[in-house]
Amino acid sequence: MGYLHDQSFDYIIAAFAQCPDENLSNLNNVTSTYTAISTHLTTQPNSCSYTMALALPMHNLPMDEPAASEVFEYNNQTFYCWKLTETERAHIASMLNMDATDLKLKGNNFLQDRSQCRGCGKHSGMDDFVHNALFAGIHSVEFMKDFLLGKTEQATPYTEHEVTCSRCSTKHDETKSWPTYPPWPRY
Ligand SMILES: [Zn+2]
């Protein structure tokens, strides 16, 4: 299972094994699990007691201290480029069932700097957005993969999201936002 946080994955499978939704009865790999749970959360949000508790599964990955964001100006706005740490890269790759070396993203340009989770100390990262989007059923694995690989254009010129810590489920006070331009740096 590679980098995947095996413990929480097993925990998710064990919990959903008792859910009456038959689409959740065949969870045998990361992609099908994330997709099935996303679908489940979207279509049957209250069908079982496990759903809400597990809406945002947590993980226990080691954290590395991210490099300071690169601050720059563009179009009279101040940007903070959150440089992807290798832990974040691996975490994203595991959620999207892809090889970390295929994720050629260097960082993400936000209008806010990273904030540190008051629950566990993890810095907000793109991995949190991927995690939140998948488990809230907002975006599919395929959508997120295409988006992060630069295969799809962002449909809106400006995006703003709340961010919940993927490690301990504590919500950050500040919402984070990013315009479509300038594009995110890649290798
Ligand atoms: Zn946290």
Image (tube, helix red, strand yellow):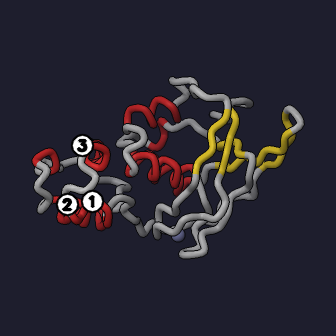
- Mark 1 and mark 3: span between their CA atoms? 16 Å
Circle 1 or circle 3, nearest the eye: 1
Q: Position of residue 69 (x, y in %)?
A: 75, 53
The 10 Å Cα crowd at callout 2, few under 14, some 14 to 19, many 20 or more, is some
Label 2: element kind: loop
Q: Of the numbered discs in the image, which one, if any, rests on residue 48?
A: 2
Q: Position of residue 116 (x, y in %)?
A: 65, 67
Dot 2 amino acid type: Cys
Nearest to the observer: residue 108 or residue 103? 108
- Mark 1 and mark 2: span between their CA atoms? 6 Å
Q: Would you say 71 lies left or right of 33 here?
A: right
Residue contact at pointers 2 and 3, CB within 8 angstroms: no
Q: Residue at x 52, y 57 (%)?
A: 87
Dot 1 amino acid type: Thr
Q: Is residue 132 depicted above or below 63 in this figure?
A: above
Q: Earlier in the sequence, mark 2 or mark 3?
A: 3
Q: Residue at x 64, y 65 (%)?
A: 173
Find disc 3 in the rendering and name its residue: 32
Q: Residue at x 31, y 62 (%)?
A: 52
Circle 2 or circle 3, nearest the eye: 2
Q: Residue at x 19, y 60 (%)?
A: 48
Residue contact at pointers 1 and 3, CB within 8 angstroms: no
Q: Is residue 34 depicted above or below 169 in this figure?
A: above
Label 1: element kind: helix
Find disc 1 in the rendering and name its residue: 51
